[in-house]
Image: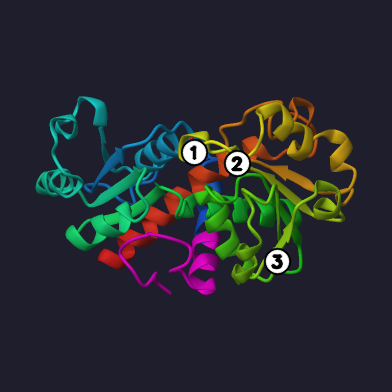
Amino acid sequence: MKLSSKDLLGIKELTKDEIILILDTASGFKGVLKRNIKKVPALRGKTAVNLFFEPSTRTRTSFELAEKRLSLDVLNLSVTTSSVVKGESLIDTALNVQALGADFMVIRHSSSGAAHLLSKNVNASVINAGDGINEHPTQALLDAFTIKEKIGKIEGLKIAIVGDILHSRVAKSNIYLLTKFGAEVRLIGPPTLVPQELEKLGVKVFHDMDSGLDGVNVVMALRIQMERQGKGFFPSTLEYSKNWGLTSERLFKADKDAIVMHPGPINRGVEVASDVADGPRSVILEQVTNGLAVRMAVMYLLAGVRE
Ligand code: CP
């Protein structure tokens, strides 16, 4: 089986079988990453360009390492020192990168739809590394990989996503993926950040932590996306953490074996208490580790489509 598109733009566009293919392929790469020699020649001679128009720690480093582990040649465009600051458009930038022979373009951008725009204008495989408030597909894939690894399945699980759902591309991609796999997805947060109308996505909306967390198998805490918010979504950070912060006391409401996830970056003491983030139920750093294998799998499979 192959993926049906040369690009990975969002989870919305993937079938369940395609997601299973990516996760199974990632399992193989996770095995490779445990070997002494962690590099494979699979994509030798191909070139990847990382175009990060927004800050990133995990996604950018993970993609770069995944590319190097697959033996790709890697270019990192430093946007702040590129001709973007002189007014060059996204498409012109991408066409110039393509003229240098890019086979993959990994893009993070503040505008929703930026990756889709790029994919219509270049022949290279475009991978969405987060576009505005739309999607962050590789984050949802690595989250799914981690849930399957820790609990063994996704179907039938109760999974709570807590926080700023409205502005979160991680939440959107996870909602698309987890509902495709038959999980009960609960969104928890204040009505301003978790509007009731999100239930049309096939999820349950809760406006209080205790009932939302009751019996869940997975708690995914999200950062407040200050950079995408105007003012007035909640009174203050202190008020937010008092009502919506994930503390060890609140975690008692969840299943006794529940795992705690967070895509990062974490604001300790705001959306998650330090003892929870560092505690025995936290799989936050395992998510980061799994991201490497998942991104290797995505690039490997997209290369198969192009060939
Ligand atoms: N999870 C995530 O996207 O983190 P970064 O913003 O650091 O890439």
Q: What amino acid is labelled 2 in the image?
A: Phe
Residue 162 located left or right of residue 113: right
Q: How far across and how far down the image is residue 53, in percent?
A: 31, 37
Relative image position of residue 8 (x, y in whole percent): 38, 59
From the viewer's perspective, is residue 207 above or below residue 231? below
Instruction: Say which element carries label 1.
Output: loop
Indicate which label's residue lies in the foreground, 3 or 2.
2
Amino acid at circle 1: Gly
User: In front: 153, or 135?
Assistant: 135
Q: Main secondary structure of the magenta part?
A: loop
Confirm or deny contact between disc 2 and disc 1 (CB under 8 A): yes
Is disc 1 surrounded by few (<14), some (14 to 19) or many (20+) residues within 10 Å? few
Quarter-wise, where is residue 76 in the image?
A: top left
Ligand 1 is within 8 Å of the C-beta of the residue at disc 1? no
| Residue, disc 1 | 230
- Residue 20 in the magenta stretch? The answer is yes
Q: Amino acid at mark 3?
A: Ala
Q: Which residues are magenta?
A: 1-24
Q: CA separation, marks 2 and 1?
A: 8 Å
Q: Answer whether residue 189 is magenta in the image.
A: no
- The mark found on residue 222 in the picture is none
Queried on whether the Cβ of the residue with tag 3 lies below 8 angstroms from ligand 1, the answer reads: no
The answer, for residue 78, to whether it is visible in the render is no
Q: CA distance from mark 3 to mark 1?
A: 32 Å
Q: Residue tagged by mark 3? A: 183
| Residue bearing the label numbered 2 | 233
Quarter holding the N terminus? bottom left
Marks counted in the figure total: 3
